[in-house]
Amino acid sequence: MRPAPGQSPHELAAEMGVADADRYPWLLLDPHSVEVGSRVRGDELSIYVQY
């Protein structure tokens, strides 16, 4: 995903709430945790969900 003109990838990540990786703990019925975060490569922002 590319940010809007004049917006940095870091600003876009902060606006989307994925600037820092968040880990969501497992639940009783689903014993897997989920991590959501982002990576910046040059002028591109990659968002990931790790299960």
Image (cartoon, rainbow, N blue to C red):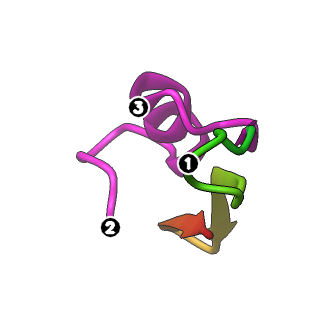
Farthest residue to the bottom: give it.
41
Q: Residues within 10 Å of mark 1 (few under 14, many from 20)?
A: few
The answer to which of marks 3 and 1 sits earlier in the sequence is 3
For mark 2, give the secondary structure.
loop
Tell me how far mark 1 sits from mark 2, CA to CA. Answer: 33 Å
Give the extent of the magenta segment: 1-24
Q: Quadrant of the C terminus?
A: bottom right
Instruction: Determine the residue positioned at 43% across, 38% down.
Output: 12
Instruction: Check if mark 3's residue and mark 1's residue have beta carbons within 8 Å.
Output: no
User: At which x and y percent is residue 35?
Assistant: 68, 53
User: At which x and y percent is residue 46?
Assistant: 51, 69
**Quick one: 49 or 40, which is closer to the camera?**
49
User: At which x and y percent is residue 19?
Assistant: 65, 37
Tell me how far mark 3 sits from mark 1, CA to CA. Answer: 28 Å
The circle drawn on residue 16 is 3
**Quick one: 14 or 35, which is closer to the camera?**
35
**Quick one: 50 or 39, which is closer to the camera?**
50
- What amino acid type is highlighted by mark number 3? Met
User: At which x and y percent is residue 7?
Assistant: 39, 38
Instruction: Determine the residue positioned at 62% across, 74% down.
Output: 42
Tell me how far mark 2 sits from mark 3, CA to CA. Answer: 12 Å
Say which residue label 1 marks. Answer: 29
The circle drawn on residue 1 is 2
The answer to which of marks 2 and 3 sits earlier in the sequence is 2
Q: Residues within 10 Å of mark 2 (few under 14, many from 20)?
A: few
Q: Name the image quarter holding residue 50.
A: bottom right
**Quick one: 38 or 50, which is closer to the camera?**
50
